[in-house]
Image (cartoon, rainbow, N blue to C red):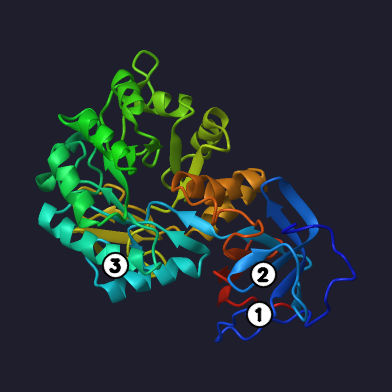
């Protein structure tokens, strides 16, 4: 088992203190036994659990001479999976160089996101295609899990922080241009599926194994049902940038919540959603169909100030990002460790439901659940150590500490 009740006959070793945070130790052939934590497994929470890391993987049995680390009083969770993220650490995924993109990736990695799909924003098609080429190289190197195109195929009525002058209808030929530019690394495209070409583009994406997401849309309930039937499987940041629920015109939210084929994204930062809206989504979609995302922009992990989101200028004040012109919310400064802490301490979600929304559900959506998303033998050793108050203390990715836990 990946985690079970403590066995006092297990290999002994160093208890209490991990290596200094300036190093990135690899368990190597000796392995690690992480002992005594509350471990969140697919089957529930195991108290005084034990998890074995051997090389880059979670293992069923501890190798000889494995190092034992006492995590009593801590939580042990799978690494987070973020499927919608525009940047961080002052770096943009939409326009940055490879080095800048990696800065943003690392910013989120030290906050627990061990798997990251990077998102672009609306821009000229040639600019998007060039950036997709750069991002595809990072995906091929294993630094990111692929590319999400948010725009330009969205509604001017619900454009949010996207340049209206650069919006266009979702012509399948132009959608295909972006897929080709991403060289097989496109993971998701957000569309206003009610626009001309929208349904045909959804079918094209489904045929190529790319997620079609309904978002920044002015669609009716009936139009959204048509998009889902055509192959759309994600609601881009549900509730935001779409018509709200009406009693005679229920709109896209009702259609997206009620269909078991759809995973709904939620930005749990306390700004984008009222807690009652989050509870509504969990109640109607259920804990297996919610994916927490950051929708982060450059300022995540970087502080207040002025930034660019694509071609648009953004002012961040008290951690809230808004367009300088018009004042629309412009993404977030959220990191997923904060989303988890808020979910369990403020929203009072069961820990296993919050963890599923941060790990297992997005991993399944990406088709990567055989490798990531839960703490099970044979999967990548992507794991997080948190204290009793759900403050992040340690991050491991593929068996290497990104943040080394400093334990008493």
* Any part of residue 184 in sight: yes
Residue in view at x 33 percent, y 44 percent: 210
Work out how far the residue at label 3 is from the one at label 2, CA to CA, in angstroms: 29 Å
Q: Compare residues 69 and 305 and report the one nearer the observer.
A: 69
Q: Which residue is mark 1?
A: 29
SS under mark 1 = loop
Residue 374 horizontal/vertical position (percent): 61, 54
The reply to whether the C-beta atoms of the residues labelled 3 and 2 are less than 8 Å apart is no
The vertical placement of 65 against 386, above or below, is below
Residue 137 is tagged as 3
Q: Quadrant of residue 213?
A: top left
Q: Which residue is mark 2?
A: 53
Residue in view at x 45 percent, y 30 percent: 261
The vertical placement of 223 against 161, above or below, is above
The vertical placement of 49 against 265, above or below, is below
SS under mark 2 = strand
How crowded pointer 2 is (Cα within 10 Å; few <14, some 14-19, many 20+) is rated as many
| Mark 1 / mark 3, whichever is N-terminal | 1
Residue 255 horizontal/vertical position (percent): 40, 24
310 horizontally vs 22: left or right: left
Q: Quadrant of residue 394?
A: bottom right
For the N terminus, the quadrant is bottom right
SS under mark 3 = helix
Q: Mark 1 or 2, which is nearer the eye?
A: 1
Residue in view at x 49 percent, y 35 percent: 277
């Amino acid at each position: 088992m990946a985690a079970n009740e403590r066995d006092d006959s297990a290999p002994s070793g160093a208890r209490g203190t991990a290596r200094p945070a300036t190093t990135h130790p690899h368990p190597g052939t000796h392995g690690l036994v992480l002992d005594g934590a509350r471990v969140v497994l697919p089957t529930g929470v195991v108290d005084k659990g034990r998890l074995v890391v051997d090389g880059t993987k979670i293992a069923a049995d501890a190798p000889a001479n494995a190092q034992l680390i006492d995590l009593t009083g801590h939580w042990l969770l799978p690494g987070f999976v973020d499927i919608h993220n525009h940047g961080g650490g002052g770096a943009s995924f939409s326009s940055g160089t490879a080095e800048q993109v990696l800065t943003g990736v690392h910013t989120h990695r030290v906050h627990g996101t061990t798997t990251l799909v990077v998102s672009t924003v609306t821009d000229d098609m040639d600019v998007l295609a060039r950036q997709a080429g750069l991002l595809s190289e990072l995906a091929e190197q294993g630094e990111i899990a692929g590319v999400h195109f948010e725009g330009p195929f969205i509604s001017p009525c619900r454009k949010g922080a996207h340049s209206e002058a650069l919006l266009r209808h979702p012509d399948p030929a132009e959608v295909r241009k972006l897929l080709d530019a991403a060289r097989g690394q496109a993971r998701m495209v957000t569309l206003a599926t009610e626009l001309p070409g929208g349904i045909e583009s959804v079918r094209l994406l489904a045929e190529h194994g790319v997620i079609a997401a309904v978002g920044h849309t002015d669609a009716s309930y009936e139009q959204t049902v048509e998009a889902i039937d055509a192959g759309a499987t994600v609601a881009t940041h549900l509730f935001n940038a779409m018509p709200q629920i009406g009693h005679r015109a229920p709109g896209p939210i009702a259609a997206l919540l009620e269909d078991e084929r759809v995973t709904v994204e939620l930005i749990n930062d306390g700004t984008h959603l009222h807690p009652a809206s989050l509870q509504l989504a969990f109640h109607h979609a259920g804990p297996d169909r919610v994916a927490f995302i950051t929708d982060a922009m450059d300022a995540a992990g970087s502080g207040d100030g002025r930034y660019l989101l694509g071609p648009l200028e953004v002012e961040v004040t008290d951690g809230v990002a808004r367009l300088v012109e018009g004042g629309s919310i412009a993404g977030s400064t959220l990191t997923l460790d904060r989303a988890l802490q808020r979910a369990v301490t403020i929203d009072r979600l069961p820990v296993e439901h919050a963890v599923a929304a941060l790990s297992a559900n997005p991993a399944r959506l990406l088709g990567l659940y055989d490798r990531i998303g839960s703490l099970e033998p044979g999967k990548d050793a992507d794991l997080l150590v948190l204290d009793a108050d759900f403050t992040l203390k340690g991050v491991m990715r593929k068996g290497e500490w990104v943040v080394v836990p400093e334990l008493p």
